[in-house]
Amino acid sequence: MQAGLPDIGETFVLESANGCDLLVRKEYRDAVASGEFTNPERLAAEAGDGARLLRGRGKPVSVPIPGRPGERMVVRKYLHGGLSGPLFGGVFFGFSRSSAEAAVAEYAFRSGVPTFLPLAAVTRRFLALFYRAWLVSLEIQGGIDLLEYLSSSPDPALKARVLEAAGRTVRKMHDRGIVHADLHVKNLLARGTDGPAPEVFVLDWDKSRIHEAATRRQRLLNLERLDRSAYKLALRGVSVTLRDRLRFLRGYTGGDGMFEPAAFAGRGPARRIHALLWRIGDLFR
């Protein structure tokens, strides 16, 4: 494994399948190894009416797992984002990002952080140094990402519970030493949003890092990244109030006074500049 990542050799086995390197969870080997993951569209077609296309980069697809009634797997292709997306698409160089993400996800899952269970990391190399990659995970069924949830104008009392649960989940992630590379509202998945004890899961561990302990600065940067994504929703007309953001922070701190809520309450010059640049970029999408 790459330096700094946990060893998952006891849980996963590495083998070749369909011209790819397949790092697959042992107990799912027979069910997963036969899939044509390098062609999710074909995989979806073979699954028939049981397949679902999901939102997100890489056009992830959800299909039933053969031989495991009621379980589904999500296959997500790795694609470059931002300005490099149109240029490089799904071509990467060096160490497999899908293997690295599977290792971080496995560590998070074992550590009690609510997240998906990684099933396989698929890497197809070409020209020796380049590769394409896919990640296969167990689907968290019945969930809705926070972007979609907050856009649905939920009941304020229920929303408060969900946001506090999100805060507790992110706090647990940081307490386990994990710093998320792209923490925003779409990478948090809520389930049981109509009940008294909602659950919130962390998604997308790509390029995330594991430390012995997350520093105060690392925590603040992660939280500010999440807060910026919430602020963007407000610019789109989605109701994300200051009270909502403080509800999340209350769940995160658990009343231990780690951070002052006022630190996240203002809209200083830096945030206004960020919002302006985001609006300009939105015109060219």
Image (cartoon, rainbow, N blue to C red):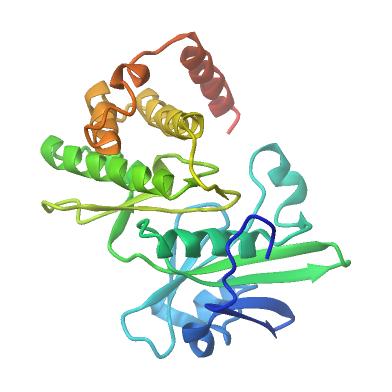
Of residue 72 and residue 3, the one placed in the foreground of this image is: 3
> In the image, what residue occupies the spot 64% across and 55% down?
4
Residue furthest front as drawn: 212
Q: Residue 86 location, x and y as percent?
A: 72, 45
Up-down: is 109 above or below 167?
Answer: below
Judge whether 247 appears above or below 76 on screen. above
Residue name at image x 33 percent, y 26 percent: 237
Quarter residue 68 falls in: bottom left
User: Going 22% across and 44% down the picture, which residue do you hit?
Assistant: 162
Rendered view: 222 above or below 196: above
Where residue 105 sits in the image (x, y, percent)?
A: 49, 60
Residue at 74% in and 60% down:
95
Q: Is residue 82 left or right of residue 159?
A: right
Q: Is residue 80 visible?
A: yes
Q: Is residue 194 above or below residue 248?
A: below
Q: Does residue 239 appear in this view? A: no
Nearer to us in this view, 21 or 260: 260
Return the residue nearer the eye: 97 or 233.
97
